[in-house]
């Protein structure tokens, strides 16, 4: 295989292009916008930058955030210190950095919209608004709104979340996460360089209702949304049953990132999985299995082993995390209360935020720590009853 076409130049496509071009393949990447401010929080976890250190070791502007405040109805809020900071980029800057790396590695990066891809005896013919290109292999990286019908995840209504919000003037050092009654989703306030991104994501609720919930929240917080720049986009959030049927590869192509539905169904984190799947797709292409169907199967196997089984398990937990009940209260309220009262539970939450605690294995760790956590909660409650607040201060 000599010529690879990468369709879409977001984090998934750009990283795959860099890896393949660096290995000496002839790579052409097509993106209709190139670097742009894709609607996104821009948050990168420890899991991402510990595996790909260039994501933190660079001159591109970014914020390092070391505190998250979690809040839930009837539970107040709690501050969670992040031992492993979260990085926050503007997507324009992050995309530009990744595209520049791909170009430096030797990829030909072209601003063009892909309108069709067809396969003939001599490989792929890719039609763009600028002309026609030929390739032996295609990597589909066109994001959640992939317009290429025959390749990539076939998202059904239950497999997506709406995500929308406002970029507002302002600054704060911390991230805010607000859970809401009856919503499988949450509101976030992310500090970015020069402004805040305030947004909401949710499953099973129409976007206008989510927008109302967000604007009510912003009104209560005194954050002006009128006149602020609005954004909205689709977020893959596959149902548990959809993972098995997920169309991530076929003869002569592989899908990466959002186009392959590779997003955490609970948090909406997709940047790490975009970059990681771009990497795994490149590895599968370079490993050059004897047949194309074996190459496609190798990629599926790599994905499953690396993180897709964990995301599939996350899909089974998602509803319980947001709208489930535990000890006569909502799960989000209990999460806030336990984080406040139990250092052990707080450590688990920190590891979840950093991406160090997979969903597979979470139940075991929670159960292992349950007695200790409940003991800490009991001690913390009796301490607060015995010692008046003033004396504690
Ligand atoms: C509101 C919101 C907030 C989010 N916040 C976070 C967060 O904080 N952290 C996190 O990890 N994830 C977050 N995500 C998820 C994250 O944005 C995505 O998972 C990530 O962008 C996926 O990268 P990608 O390269 O697969 O797709 P994209 O970034 O969507 O890139 C796809 C690229 O393909 C191009 N393209 C599409 N169609 C064509 C075509 N026909 N021809 C040529 N080019 C085309 C587009 O121009 C685009 O550049 C958020 C998502 C949303 C919607």
Image: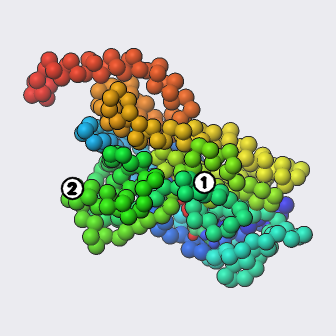
On screen, residue 280 above or below 107: above
Instruction: Tell me where residue 388 appears, x and y as whole percent.
Output: 11, 23
| Observer able to see residue 101 | no
In the image: residue 302, left or right of residue 287: left
Instruction: Tell me where residue 327 appears, x and y as whole percent.
Output: 35, 26
What label sits on residue 261 in the rendered view? 1
Q: Tell me the crowding category of disc 2: few under 14, some 14 to 19, or many 20 or more residues within 10 angstroms, Cα based.
A: few
Question: Which residue is identified by label 2?
Answer: 220
User: Secondary structure under badge 1?
Assistant: loop
Instruction: Tell me where residue 160 appears, x and y as whole percent.
Output: 53, 55
In the image: residue 49, left or right of residue 380: right
Of pointers 1 and 2, the one earlier in the residue sequence: 2
Residue depicted at x 14% and y 25%: 392
Q: Quadrant of residue 192?
A: bottom left
The reply to whether discs 1 and 2 touch (Cβ–Cβ < 8 Å) is: no
Quadrant containing ligand 1: bottom right
Q: In which quarter of the image is the C terminus?
A: top left
Q: Tell me the crowding category of disc 1: few under 14, some 14 to 19, or many 20 or more residues within 10 angstroms, Cα based.
A: many
On screen, residue 106 above or below 313: below
Residue lying furthest bottom in this view? 130
């Amino acid at each position: 295989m000599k010529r690879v076409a990468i369709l879409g130049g977001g984090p998934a496509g750009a990283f795959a292009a860099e890896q393949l071009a660096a290995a000496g393949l002839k790579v052409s990447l097509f993106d209709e916008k190139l670097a742009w401010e894709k609607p996104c929080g821009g948050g990168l976890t420890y899991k991402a930058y510990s595996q790909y250190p260039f994501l933190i070791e660079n001159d591109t502007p970014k914020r390092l955030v070391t505190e998250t405040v979690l809040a839930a109805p009837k539970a107040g809020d709690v501050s969670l210190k992040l031992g492993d900071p979260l990085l926050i980029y503007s997507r324009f800057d992050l995309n530009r950095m990744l595209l520049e790396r791909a170009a430096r590695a030797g990829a030909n990066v072209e601003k063009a919209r892909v309108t069709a891809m067809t396969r003939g005896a001599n490989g792929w013919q890719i039609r763009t608004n600028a002309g026609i290109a030929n390739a032996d292999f295609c990597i589909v990286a066109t994001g959640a709104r992939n317009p290429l019908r025959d390749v990539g995840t076939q998202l059904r209504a239950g497999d997506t979340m709406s995500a929308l919000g406002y970029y507002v003037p302002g600054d704060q050092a911390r991230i805010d996460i607000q859970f809401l009654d009856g919503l499988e989703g949450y509101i976030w306030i992310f500090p970015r360089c020069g402004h805040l991104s305030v947004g909401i994501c949710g499953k099973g609720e129409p976007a206008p209702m989510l927008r109302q919930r967000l604007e009510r929240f912003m009104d209560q917080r005194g954050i002006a949304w009128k006149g602020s720049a609005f954004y909205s986009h689709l977020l893959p959030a596959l149902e548990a049953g959809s993972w098995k049927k997920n169309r991530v590869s076929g003869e002569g192509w592989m899908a990466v990132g959002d186009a392959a539905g590779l997003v955490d169904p609970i948090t909406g984190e997709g940047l790490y999985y975009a970059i990681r799947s771009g990497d795994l797709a490149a590895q599968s292409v370079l490993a050059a299995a004897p047949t194309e169907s074996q190459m496609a199967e190798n990629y599926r196997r790599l994905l499953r082993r690396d993180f897709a089984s964990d995301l599939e398990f996350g899909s089974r937990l998602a509803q319980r995390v947001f709208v489930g009940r535990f000890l006569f209260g909502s799960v989000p309220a209990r999460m806030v209360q336990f984080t406040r009262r139990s250092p052990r539970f707080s450590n688990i939450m920190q590891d979840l935020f950093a991406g160090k605690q997979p969903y597979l294995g979470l139940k075991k760790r929670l159960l292992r720590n349950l007695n200790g956590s409940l003991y800490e909660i009991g001690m913390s409650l009796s301490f607060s009853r015995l010692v008046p607040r003033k004396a504690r201060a």
